[in-house]
Amino acid sequence: MISMKKWNYLVITLLLIVIVGLFTAMAMAAGDSTEKIVLKLAHNGSAEHAFQFGYMKFKEILEKEAPGRFEVQIFPSEQLGPDENCSELVKMGSIAGNAANAAAFVPEADIFNFPFIFKDLDHFYRVLDGAPGERVARAIEDKLNCVVLGYFFSGIRNEWNKKRPVLVPKDLVGLKIRTLGSPIFIDTFNALGAQATPMSFGEVYTAIQQGVIDGAETDHVDLLIEKFYEVTKYVSLTGHIYLAIPFIFSEAILNKLTDDEKELIIKAGKEAVSYQREVMEQQEVDARKKLESEHGIEFFDVDVSLFQEATKPIYVKYADSVGGLGYIEEIINY
């Protein structure tokens, strides 16, 4: 028989083992909770693009307010693959974020790509940060299993080419103009009289150089950074698109975080979007000055109303795909 003294010893030993085990488990859990989280962010702009500055602001806030908890890695210039692939990676939780061309997945997001739908930059921000932007964000979130942290500003797009100034729509007749692959972009330039030619952005410079196309439509920053000024001459200030790019963040990754960490991600995202917009606005101004003064690019004002009139059929053709004419009118009058 076991004596009472030995029995008490066994009980105390077992209790100590249990207590040590509990403390070990708690320490391991604590170690897991404080393990550094690596967040990979992708975008298709260069390291000089305003997207990069927005991401750097996001990184700065997270690493400052939660030191040692997050490591933010930024991959510009499609280093992790084309934009659509990166959005799929966000959806799967393989990477944390992307500056996404959401219209490739979410038809409702194409509403922001209608020509001349925005009056000016204030109107653009008002729409994106208001009810229309929220409605599109919810659709994006449903399709891509993500959270939209806000909308980046990717510049005001204008037509440019190497052959002649475009002052009225008929000046585009016979010109092969590269556009984004969205049917709305393609039909817009076809409606204006051009021969819309979608192609990869990385092929544009060589295509103009070789005469495959005559020009394209971009913002001033891309025109400068990508050195398109070497293969073109005339920029027409059509301002047909104010390009909105959602900053999406993986919901699968977000759901693994604590409530405080989730709040920090949302906060950092909002501040990053605000900062990115400021940088992009200034880059647009600086780029035009350099293009004119250093590279001899000629800029021409146009009668925008003539271009608006020519593209009205686009609204009717694609209204149903973005929710109806009512939604388009809401944005125009917002």
Image (tube, rainbow, N blue to C red):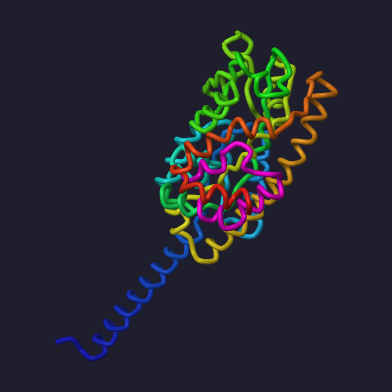
The quadrant holding residue 288 is top right
**Magenta residues, dominant SS class:** helix
Q: Which residue is drawn at 60% across and 48% down?
A: 151
Q: Which of 21 and 334 is in front in this view?
A: 334
Whether residue 165 is visible to the viewer of this picture, yes or no, is yes
Q: Which residue lies furthest to the top in this view?
A: 210
Q: Is residue 117 on the magenta stretch?
A: yes
Q: Which residue lies furthest to the bottom in this view?
A: 4
Q: Which of 7 and 232 is in front in this view?
A: 232
Q: In this view, does 29 lie above or below 143?
A: below
Whether residue 106 is visible to the viewer of this picture, yes or no, is no
Q: Residue at x 78, y 20 (%)?
A: 297
Q: What stretch is highlighted in magenta?
A: 108-136
The quadrant holding residue 116 is top right
- Residue 79 x/y as whole percent: 53, 31
- Residue 29 x/y as whole percent: 42, 64
Q: Is residue 184 on the magenta stretch?
A: no
Q: Which of 14 and 112 is in front in this view?
A: 112
Q: Say how many tags the image has.
A: 0
Considering the image in quadrants, where does the N terminus appear? Answer: bottom left
Considering the image in quadrants, where does the C terminus appear? Answer: bottom right
Q: Residue furthest left?
A: 1
> Is residue 126 left or right of 145 when viewed as pictured?
right
Q: Which of 272 and 63 is in front in this view?
A: 272
Q: Is residue 84 above or below residue 137?
A: above
Q: Which residue lies furthest to the right in this view?
A: 293
- Residue 219 x/y as whole percent: 68, 31
- Residue 201 x/y as whole percent: 57, 24
Q: Which residue is drawn at 62% across and 45% down?
A: 152
